[in-house]
Amino acid sequence: MRDPRDIAIGVFFLALSGVLLFAIQGFPSGTLAEGMGARLMPLVLTLCLAFLSLLLLLHGFRSGRYQPGESLAPAGRALDPPLLGPHLKTPGILIALLTAYLLVLEYAGFLAGNAVFLLLATRSLGATWKGAAKTSLFLTVLTYLIFGVALDVPLPAFSLLAR
C-alpha cells in the first residue's frame, strides 16, 4: 500500500528542507521595528517545502495497492516514466541552483548572487543567453528596489574578500 515514487521524492525534498534551514541560519532575521530581515522569505518558503514534503510522504504511505514488480500506471494507460528520468532534468537543475544560491548568498552578496542565479535559472528554462541576461538584470534590479530600497530589508552584501 505504498507508492515508492511519492516516498522517494518526499524524503528528498524533506532532506533538502533540512539543508536549506541550516543554510539560512546565518541570514539576518530582523525585528518588526527594524524590518523583516533577509531570513524571512527563505524561511517561509523552506517551511512550506517541508510541509508539502510531509504531505507527499503521507500520501505515498497511504496510496493504493502497489506490489513490487507491478506497474504503477492505471489499467489502460502507458507506463509512468522512471523515477529518475530525463523529465526531471530541469527541476533538478533548478533545485541545485536554488540550493547553491542559498549557500553562497551570504558571501557573494544579494546583487551578484541574485543576478547569477536568475541568469542560470532562466537559461535552464530555455531562454537564450541574451534573453536570460536581460531577465536576470531586470529582476535583480526590481527585487533590489522593492526589498532593499522600498521595504528597507537588509540584503546580504558582497563579503567574499572580507572573510
Image (tube, rainbow, N blue to C red):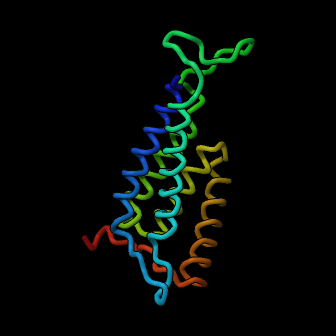
Q: Is residue 97 above or below residue 22?
A: above
Q: Position of residue 79 (x, y in %)?
A: 65, 15
The quadrant holding residue 77 is top right
Query: In terms of depth relative to the viewer, which is nearer, 28 or 112?
Result: 28
Viewport quadrant of the C terminus:
bottom left
Q: Nearer the viewer, residue 16 or 159?
A: 16
Q: Position of residue 53 (x, y in %)?
A: 50, 44
Q: Is residue 53 visible?
A: yes
| Up/down of 44 relative to 2, above or below | below
Furthest-bottom residue in this view = 33
Whether 65 is drawn above or below 94: the answer is above
- In this view, the residue farthest toward the left is 163
Q: Is residue 84 visible?
A: no
Residue name at image x 53 percent, y 62 percent? 115
Residue at the spot x=57%, y=55% of the render?
119
- Across and down, in percent, residue 46 comes to 48, 57
When the figure is inspected, residue 86 is found, relative to residue 78, above or below; the finding is below
Left or right of residue 58, residue 73 in this image: right
